[in-house]
Amino acid sequence: MELKTVFRAFNSAEAQLVRSQLEAAGFTVFVADETSALSMEGYVLGAGGIRVQVPDDREAEAKALLKSCGYPVE
């Protein structure tokens, strides 16, 4: 199973909110780079954000859900 990034957040609260919305809709979700982003001030920008990922076979569904909620998707 390959993971695909469906959303990038620049703070942990937003990443966790998106994660919880996806999980409530039945998605398996992985939040990548959150610990690294929190370890040093400004690192989140250099790392390209905190990535919210889902399995590749559910990428389109997850993006559609996030788009319907008003989130910008990749």
Image (cartoon, helix red, strand yellow):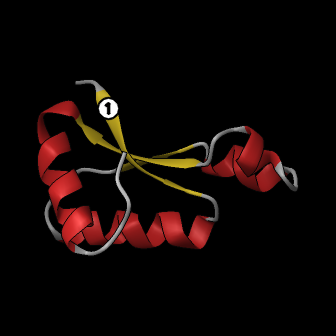
Left/right placement of residue 63 relative to residue 39 reads: left
Q: Residue at 47% of width from left, 67% of height from top?
A: 16
Q: Is residue 32 left or right of residue 57?
A: right
Which residue, given by chain and number where applicable, does mark 1 sit on?
3
Hey, which quadrant is residue 18 in on the image?
bottom left
- In the image, taking residue 35 as reference, residue 42 lies left or right, namely right
Label 1's element?
A: strand
Q: Quadrant of residue 2?
A: top left
Image quarter hosting the N terminus? top left
**Residue 12: horizontal and vertical position, in percent?**
61, 65
What percent of the width, then of the height, locates residue 57? 12, 34
Query: Is 55 rendered above or below residue 22?
Result: above
Label tally = 1
Residue at horizontal 62%, vertical 51%?
Answer: 34
Residue 49 image position (x, y, % from top left) = 61, 48
Residue 74 visible in this rendered orientation of the protein: yes
> Which residue is outermost to the top?
1
Mark 1 is surrounded, within 10 Å at the Cα level, by few (under 14), some (14 to 19) or many (20 or more) other residues, namely some
Question: Is residue 4 depicted above or below 30 in this figure?
Answer: above
What type is the residue that disc 1 sits on? Leu
Where's residue 50, x and y in %? 57, 50
As drawn, which residue projects farthest toward the right? Answer: 41
